[in-house]
Image: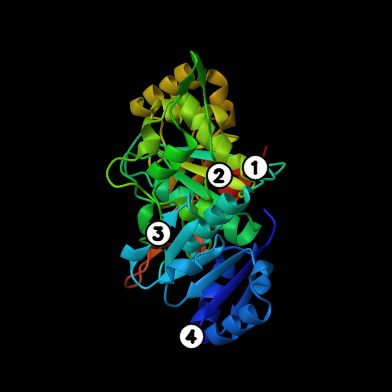
Amino acid sequence: MENIVLGIVSADQDYCRALGLSLLAVSDDFLIHYFDTKNFVRECNRDEGDFMEQFDLILWDGKEIEDTYNGHLIFLAEKASLVKKDYQNQKFSLYKYCGASAMTSALFEIYSCLTGRGVVFIPKDLVSMIAFGSWEGGSGCTTVTLAVAQELCRFHGNRILVLSLESVESTAGHFDYVPEIKSIGEFLYRVLPEKIIDAGNASQEKTVPFFESYIVKDLYGIEAFAPSRGKNPISELSEEDMQKLVATVIDSGRYDAVLIDMGTCLTKAAVAVMEMADKLCFITKNQQVTRREEMYLGHVMVCAGEETLSKAIRLTNMVKDASTENKEDGGRHYVNERARARAFEFSVAKSEPEQIILEGAFGEDIRKLAQQLLRR
């Protein structure tokens, strides 16, 4: 999408600047001009309306007057109940105090409606897809996923998306939550519409919404979809729908790597993920191969293929003594590549998301693990 020339008109210039900077912090697709209300009206009267045509969209912070409605004039409402999105008559108003991500997405959608121009995605040549799973609860699958995401984001400069397949997501506590953000369930509704039967022929339509409406971020810029209330809808997707979701994310050109926290999930969606992933990391707290691990890996081989284990790393998490040498355990479904991670720490501040500390021994082990996972 080309740059959108945006005019912000308000008697409160401090609000103008704050709104403009917050929109630019979300997206650099705007060219923003600030105007005092009286000066803007004076310029419009002087040029007999031609002045307004210089702008693709105009945000008007003032009294709403019905007869001044214009397709690209958007009123900023003082109350959320006054928000209006009438695409047919091209009349729009947005909540003045909504989050910058929500307002940015709404502006993109309005602009697309008015001009017929949509987002053009430029896929990246190489997007890494790494999945993390375990055959036992409490092994730290989510922690390791987020720690590797932080390592790749902070020290490799990658833009990362974390997807969770857990029935009840545990990743949400690590991200800043914005009330206006839409959930992953709503994203799936847009990306995976039901089949439409037209004259006896089944057709599949797909629209790609603006990611900003559905994304939450952590302190380091790692992104994730805002969770739905109740059960996580991603875990129940079919293999075909999971493939479509991953393809949509990758084709957006937004990310350098997609990290998927499967937890103990072995649904069809998880099988699809293991088949698509470049690397797998199976996490356990036990150094020795247990009967449960053999059963889990046996199921993986049956469902996802024997070659799946050839791209897998077995991570022994929360190791107390990292100096202990690896011991051959003779497990029937033994994964050749092995890694270790020592104890980790969290940082919890008041009213802030939980942060994983990548300092000390745990950080060193995660760094080594990330290097192994990036190796093709």
Residue drawn at x 56%, y 47% is 369
Between the residue at mark 3 and the residue at mark 4, the CA separation in whole angstroms equals 23 Å
The residue type indicated by label 4 comes to Asp
Distance between the alpha carbons at the discs numbered 1 and 2: 7 Å
The reply to whether callout 1 and callout 2 are in contact (CB within 8 Å) is yes
Instruction: Specify which label sits upstream in the sequence, 2 or 4.
Output: 4
| Three-letter code, disc 1 | Val
Disc 1 to disc 3, how far (Cα)?
Answer: 39 Å
Q: Nearer the viewer, mark 1 or mark 4?
A: 4
Which mark is first along the chain, 4 or 1?
4
Residue 286 image point, x, y percent:
38, 39
> In this rendering, which labeled residue sits more in front, label 1 or label 3?
3
At horizontal 35% and vertical 25% (from top left) the residue drawn is 291
Which one is in front in this view, the residue at disc 3 or the one at disc 4? 3
First of labels 1, 3 by sequence position: 3
Residue named by callout 4: 12
For mark 3, give the secondary structure: strand
Badge 4 element: loop
Q: Residue furthest top?
A: 200
* Residue 239, x across and y down, in percent: 47, 25
Q: Which amino acid type is marked by label 3?
A: Lys
